[in-house]
Amino acid sequence: MPFRVETFDRIEDAARALAANRNARFYGGGTILMCAVNAGSQSFDTLIRINRNDLGIIRAEGDRMSIGSGVTMSQVLQSRDLDFLHPVAIAVGGPAIRTAATVGGNLYAAAPYGDFATALLALGAEVQFGGDGGSAMPIDQFLADRDRHRERIVSNILVRRPGDAGSFRFRKVTRVKPKGVAVMTLAALLPRSRSGIRVAYGNMAPTPVRAAAVERALEGANLDEAGIGPALAAATRGLSPASDALASQWYRQEVAPVHLKRMLLGQAG
Amino acid sequence: MAKKPLQFNLNGEDRAVFVADGENLLDTLRRGVGDLTPKFGCAQGTCGACTVLIDGEPRMSCLTLSETIGGSRVETTAGLGDGGKLHPLQDAFMRNFSAQCGYCTPGMLMAAKALLDRNPAPSRDDIVQAISGNLCRCTGYEPIIRAIEEAAGMARGATGAGR
């Protein structure tokens, strides 16, 4: 099936065209959509893109960083202001993927992808849309109803730097080193005060999700073997991960506490 | 469907072609321009056989929408050598028996070139990271890593850098 590409100068015009065509998808870096195009996908027939790279800007906005949805993983790695996200960006694909894969695209990436979105979920980011007055939405809400937002264009993501050094943790579990698709991804924001804790999993559900039971168990807890015990016991409560070529549901449920422990205690391996 | 005109620079030469909507750069290079050095592997960005450099950065040409590269500088393995003289990377690959079937080699060479252009004295870990998006099912990677280390050393020797 032939595909049509519509190119716009302004995000407002692109957003209008996207909203008006159910068979259209927004083209960011191409690392997800071009796979579908190459495979002759029947689920869409139009690619909508923006000519100017207005979406590729990283800037400070008050106490938060604004990351344009068109910012690539390579750009994240080159940004000193986003150093807390470097361990996340380097975990996405190889170098030739990172030069194209965008932060905005990662928000929409289906499991087993979406490592960056998992990190943003742990960090409590907000998603801002272009072409509709710039409304912002908590990333939790965005991910919970992600398919509904396919008809909108994310312009940028707002994220606070973690307040305490070392309070943001990220772990991607793969079978192949140094680069592989995630069996699961874990990310956590663990403020020294032990309040406002956020823990997120990738690839343990169709979209990145918070581990609410783990978060509750960690409130006020010491990050040592004894303190994290209740959190490990609750590691997969309420989660029903998929079985796929990388791992079975059983395996994911069995190893999640192991990797959660390593992340919380800052252990290697 | 009408095709769109596309102009870009390929290995130092200006090119003008027409591309179809949705056409990827790998098809444009192989079918449109006739540069057969980037290989078709998976069409999913997994194998790296189609790796080229766009404005100096490594990219999977199979995942690059052709019309997005207008005005860009594209480098492929076809442009690596200088006439009959091999690029130091090609030379090192040959000496270290870094190719068996050879299908991954053009992508490996471009991934390695992207690394050495940016970092002339890479560590072994830098090299492993640089080729982490390129699959080789023959060599076990060690001869490729050795060749890149050797090419880096040759280039440093030639320029006097790193002394």
Image (cartoon, rainbow, N blue to C red):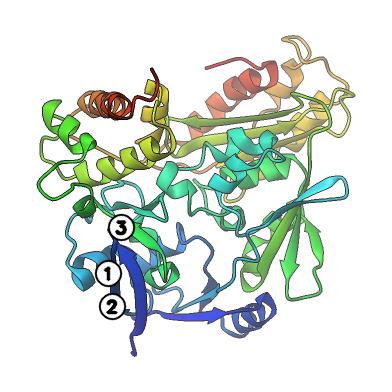
Mark 3 is on which residue type?
A: Ala
Q: CA distance from mark 1 to mark 2?
A: 8 Å
In front here: A49 or B58? B58
SS for callout 3: loop
User: Mark 1: few, some, or many residues within 10 Å (few <14, many ≥20)?
Assistant: many
The answer to which quarter of the image holds residue A193 is top right
Q: Chain of mark 3?
A: B
Location of residue B14 with respect to A228 vertically, above or below: below
Q: Chain of mark 2?
A: B
Residue at the image point whose x is 38% and y is 17% from the top: B163
Percent x, y of residue B29: 25, 65
Residue B43 numbered tag: 3
- Residue, disc 1: B28
Asked if the residue at tag 3 contacts the one at tag 1, i.e. Cβ–Cβ closer than 8 Å, the answer is no
Asked if the residue at tag 2 contacts the one at tag 1, i.e. Cβ–Cβ closer than 8 Å, the answer is yes
Q: Earlier in the sequence, mark 1 or mark 2?
A: 2
SS for callout 2: strand
Residue at the image point whose x is 27% and y is 58% from the top: B11
Location of residue A222 with respect to B104 vertically, above or below: above
**Same chain shared by disc 1 and disc 2:** yes
Percent x, y of residue A177: 40, 28
Mark 2 is on which residue type?
A: Val
Location of residue A147 with respect to A131 vertically, above or below: above
Mark 1 is on which residue type?
A: Thr
